[in-house]
Amino acid sequence: MLPVIALVGRPNVGKSTLFNCLTQTRSALVADFPGLTRDRQYGLGKIGPLPYLVVDTGGLSGETDAIDALVARQAHKAIEEADAVLLLVDARAGLAAADEEIATRLRRSGKALFLVANKTEHLDPAQATADFHALGIGAPWAISATHRRGVDALMEAVLAAAAAQRPADTLPALERTTIAADDGSIRLAIVGRPNVGKSTLVNRLLGEERVLAFDQPGTTRDAVAIPFEKDGTRYTLIDTAGVRRRSRVDDAIEKFSVIKTLQAIEEAHVVVMVLDARQGIADQDATLLGYVLDSGRALVLAVNKWDKLEPEVRDEVRGELARKLAFIDFANTHYISALHGSGVMDLFRSVRQAYAAATRKLSTPELTRILEDAVATHQPPLVHGRSIKLRYAHPGGQNPPVIVIHGSRVEHIPDAYRRYLINTFRRVLRLHGTPIRVDFKAGD
Ligand code: GDP
Ligand code: GDP
């Protein structure tokens, strides 16, 4: 499971700057989807081969009165779900009362804590951090988020501590079903905001008893892998607590966890994003969709509670949703009723199709031939009177499929031409249900 790192600190210490610094690596795909905000509170990052999830809690000011209660609750929840917590302080401003209040609260959390003194780029590290020892959560790490100084060393220590927080063999037996193991089944995440009908859909797939069996004390930690078979295909449901805990926790909002949702997306081959037909695309849907697109996972959209719409408004709702989702041109949309089961068979046909597309083995000759045809049909535009040459293409990864194109002056390829190439590869290879990434490399 993806380790979760929470950033905590009073305003202006540099949390969002560090957040951006830690999550920069994953922006390539989302640039292709205009209209989705990059202003995110949760982000994926990578140091070396190790991926992690960062949460900018934003909300802990230390001044209890001033805290918006809801924001604070989210922040506390993030801390609860985190494997390591970074308390940021401002080395230039020195120790503040709010730092002490936050530190006191964090010490009670029992989490792996790191004290991070930011803005140290022109300061002597020992002097800059001296005051902060008083916070009682260990020796401060001196960094500069804007200069990306000290950040890699800090993160290596943080990730090591986060891994140590999760001794695998102390987990109950059910939890140990390893999610990463590739057993040939389709790993599926069913996501969506509270009350859209995720649990109902899962119950329909697994049968009520099955879900209850997993809802025993001691089995409710983190996401868990639940194998099932449907129409002769094997699946592994990467469950989120929000889905599983339905029978115990009434408050859908409380049980919903962005962190567990994002972890499940990351572990999945295919994401089924569930929407409520009566509510269109709410802000929270758009944000979640943004994360799914960011992850590069194959995607199927399920517009649920279709049974609740009067037949005479269905065409209008369908049209409205199609317009709003038009920018996701690769994913199928299904109108379903999880409660009654209508549309669920077709939904799973799309899941299988998306999986096949996302994991398809592509070959260099095949990709190069498609590239040559595409270029013959539409030349790349000239840059300063000189032509861009695209020579050959080879596969660069799966889930999502990555196509690496070698050529000259490729840094000048406009977005529109990149999209043209992606659409051509998609059409010719029939890669439906998955995003496709095209990376350009200069030279041979
Ligand atoms: P947040 O409120 O904790 O999210 O803080 P921000 O990330 O918005 O940063 C607050 C201010 O501090 C901004 O003006 C940043 O540019 C600045 N800042 C952040 N990190 C550094 C740093 O490493 N060095 C310096 N000199 N300024 C920084
Ligand atoms: P979750 O929070 O996304 O897991 O949502 P639930 O599965 O708990 O569903 C929330 C509510 O919507 C419950 O009362 C369900 O019975 C109801 N519901 C779910 N799917 C459907 C559906 O297809 N049709 C109708 N009419 N109600 C549904």
Image: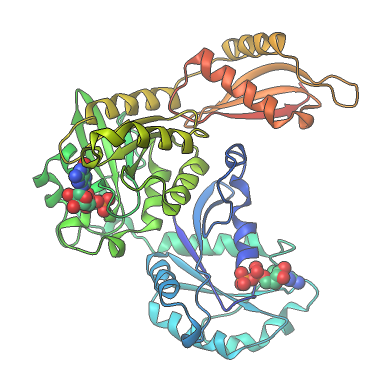
On the image, the x and y values in percent for residue 334 come to 32, 31
Position of 303 with respect to 397 (left or right) is: left
Outermost residue on the left side: it is: 209
Residue occupying image coordinates x 46% and y 48%? 286
Q: In which quarter of the image is the C terminus?
A: top right
Which residue occupies the foreground of this view, 230 or 63? 63
In this rendering, does residue 268 appear at all?
yes
Q: Which residue is drawn at 15% across and 37% down?
A: 340
**Furthest-front residue in this view:** 312
> What's the residue at 16%, 51% (across, down)?
214
Answer with the quarter of the image where residue 394 lies: top right
Residue 1 visible in this rendered orientation of the protein: no
Relative image position of residue 186 (x, y in whole percent)? 32, 31
Q: Position of residue 21 (x, y in %)?
A: 65, 58
The one nearer the camera, 379 or 315, is: 315
Residue 17 is left or right of residue 42, and the answer is: right
